[in-house]
Image (cartoon, rainbow, N blue to C red):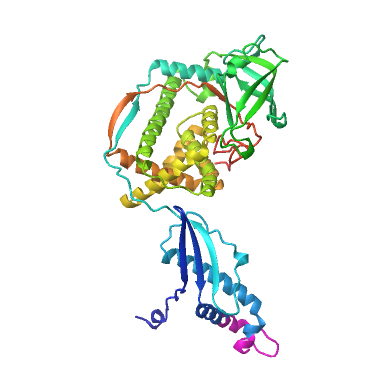
Amino acid sequence: MSDEAAAVVEPQSITLDVNVEETSTCQRKVTVSIPREEIDRYHEEAVGDLMPTALLPGFRPGRAPRKLVGNRFKTELNDQIRSKLLNDALSRVTEQEKLAPISEPDLDVAAVILPDEGPMTFEFTIEVRPEFELPEWKGLKIDRPSRDISDEDVAEALANLLRERGRLVPAKGSPQPGDLIVANLKFTDAAGELLSHAEEVEIVVRPKLSLADAELAGFDALLAKAKAGETVTAEVTVSDEAAVEAMRGQTATMSLELLDLKRFETPELTPALLGELGEFESADALNEAIRKQLESQLNWHQRKQVRHQVSSSLTASATWDLPPDLLRRQSQRELERSILELRRSGFDDDSIRRYVNDLRQSVMASTARALKEHFILEKIAEAEKVADTAGDYDGEIRAIAAQSGESPRRVRASLERRGLMDVLRNQIIERKTVDLITSQATFNDVPFEFPKPDAEAIDHAVCGIAAGEDEIPTTPVPHESPAD
């Protein structure tokens, strides 16, 4: 061993007195006491580091007495020592107590004082991964939706696609299902106070109207006899998870002023339209692309229902509670994760908006289930050494890019800018772990029918604010991303 290697000295670990109190399954209250001996050691090290460059009147650099340097720079040294003690102590607590934090410690740094005498004491709360016994995950019995994509399925999807490209023409009379109306919306509480309003909203008439924090059934029937210039009213019940707590579960009145009525004229499938839809050379090529998209959506429904059954089996014994703050923070992540998965599977913005509006109205309960499932899948992944690879990210990003019409580079830049790469990582690990579980499961194929859209979703909340964000994030790939 060389003299240089022999001179390398391992840094001395800080000695602490630690008390950890379990306040809930995922929360710990930690009290830390740093002995005076450790504070003095850190002080001596800090003064020693400062000595060579300390400038004091009457002394050359590095020649001032140690005690004089300590007194002259006491304030600066105390701030430095306190900061280093806190950082080292937090790292040591995590290691010493074998904590598995899932968030930053809730610590008021400004309230921590470095005393002139005695120990330095502080406390904080921290959220940690729950401790639990793994449920039995091998040999599950699962119903798997199954369907052969028929020509009728393709024809129906093509009709919906053409309808989206249809020309809107003025219509008279009352709205019929499938028509588009332009309306002013106003929502008031039981006392008649205005909650929110929206001007000139375009809405397709369907049996249900889906809002960010409520759903109105019988929407088509409400408008069945309305004429332009008239106002109709209906009562809606605000979701129990609305952003405005005082309105949760309360009844609000919606006033809808019908401004205009339009009807779709379905266009003919001309060569020009085929080019607009994706540079298809023929109707057969378009039909084949639609068939592949339907297969992708069927795959999503299969994964969703299989995942739901796997989740129900795994979380059946997970009766532990999760901190409300954690649930609130993670609820938006759950929405983002769902959107990424839907986007990857080829769903359009209207379908995603309907799904997200439904999810928003039960997002806390959905997030609790998803988090419990995540912790269990994470533990299985660790035990079975399931890991993510660069190829996994490339595959996910290519799939999102293919469905969004963006380049993979642009998609990656958008995900990185919005801090969604960790969401993507969780999605990859969880999917691979679910694949491992299902590879050892027994399947029973059951018939599947594609759900028919019976709700029109709009980006508006009765209370004016949607839970988690002001607007529903319909796409994770904005067009202003850096160009390829």
Q: Is residue 356 left or right of residue 431?
A: right
Seen in the picture, residue 122 relative to 361 is either above or below; the reply is below
Task: Determine whether, in the image, residue 207 is placed left or right of residue 11.
Answer: right
Residue span colored magenta: 47-68
The picture places residue 97, in percent across and down from the top left corner, at: 42, 64
User: In the image, what residue occupies the spot 42% across and 78% down?
Assistant: 9
The residue positioned 39% from the left and 79% from the top of the image is 5
Quarter the N terminus occupies? bottom left
- 3 relative to 365 in the view: left or right: left
Which residue is at the front of the view, 338 or 404? 338
Query: Which percent across, then down, holds residue 144?
Result: 33, 29
Viewer-proximal residue among 397 and 125: 125
Query: Which residue does the image show at 51% across and 66% down from the upper left?
Result: 31
Which residue is situated farthest in the front direction here? 191
Q: Look at the picture and state if 148 lies above or below 111.
A: above
Q: Is residue 471 visible?
A: yes
| In magenta stretch: residue 443 | no
Asked whether residue 393 is in view, the answer is: no
Above or below, 416 against 112 in this view is above
Q: Position of residue 283 (x, y in %)?
A: 46, 17
Q: Which picture quadrant has residue 137? A: top left
Against 312, residue 119 (above or below) is below
Quarter holding the C terminus is top right
Q: Name the residue at 39% across, 53% down.
A: 131
Q: Nearer the viewer, residue 91 or 187?
A: 187
Between 260 and 195, the one lying in front of the other is: 195
Please provide percent x and percent y for residue 333. Answer: 52, 43
Quadrant of the image occupied by residue 230: top right
